Amino acid sequence: MRKCTKCEIIKKEEDFPRTRPGDNWCKKCKYEYNRQWRKKNREKINATEKIWRYKNWDKYLESQRRYYHKNIEERREYGRKAYRKRIKINGYSSSFKSRNGVKILSKMDKCEICGTRDKLQIHHKDNQGRFNVKNGLKPNNKLTNLQVLCISCHSSLHAKLRRKS
């Protein structure tokens, strides 16, 4: 049992860091002190790190490469999330006004026919999409009527529909 000189509470031995024998602050007090110090001295820390990077450029690049290869899956997932946030389908952004459209944009990130993730569009199965507004029709934006397709599958689907009619 030791007494922390910062908070003056008697704590177990494992609550103290194993650094120096004269260090009598508990882990919690030490952590809080370091956090506050870093917050106050952010500019000093940044300047010191910048100087170190400049002097040790090869070590810095090597550490960046190691991090890059070690966390490749995490970075890919981060990229997918960022892509989903800025995805545009049929000219609609992810802030598509229809609530159903927002749901379909957030759930579907690939073509339902071929599975690609490039140049996605929303297809209205009943062919009453946003272009029918000119004819006085309201688009049917129910989730059961919407389908996410890539541009090539979407155009080939409409070509087939035109041939049938």
Image (tube, grey):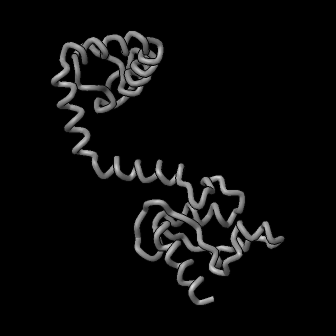
125 left or right of 46? right
Is residue 29 depicted above or below 121 in this figure?
A: above
Is residue 144 depicted above or below 95 in this figure?
A: below
Where is residue 8? Give x, y as percent.
44, 18
13 left or right of 63? right
Q: 21 or 89, which lies in front?
A: 89
Which residue is depicted at the point 28% across and 46% down?
Answer: 71
Where is residue 18? Give x, y as percent.
23, 25
The image quadrant of residue 130 is: bottom right
The image quadrant of residue 137 is: bottom right
96 left or right of 7? right
Q: Which quadrant, please, contains the N terminus?
A: top left
Is residue 97 depicted above or below 58 in this figure?
A: below
57 left or right of 49? left
Q: Which quadrant, please, contains the C terminus?
A: bottom right
Going by the picture, which residue comes out furthest to the bottom? 164
Which residue is depicted at the point 43% across and 62% down?
Answer: 117
Where is residue 124? Give x, y as percent.
64, 74
Where is residue 47? Give x, y as percent.
35, 11
Visible residue check, residue 9:
no
Q: 43 or 156, which lies in front?
A: 156
Which residue is depicted at the point 41% across and 74% down?
Answer: 114
Which residue is depicted at the point 78% across and 67% down?
Answer: 133
The image quadrant of residue 52 is: top left
Visible residue check, residue 67:
yes
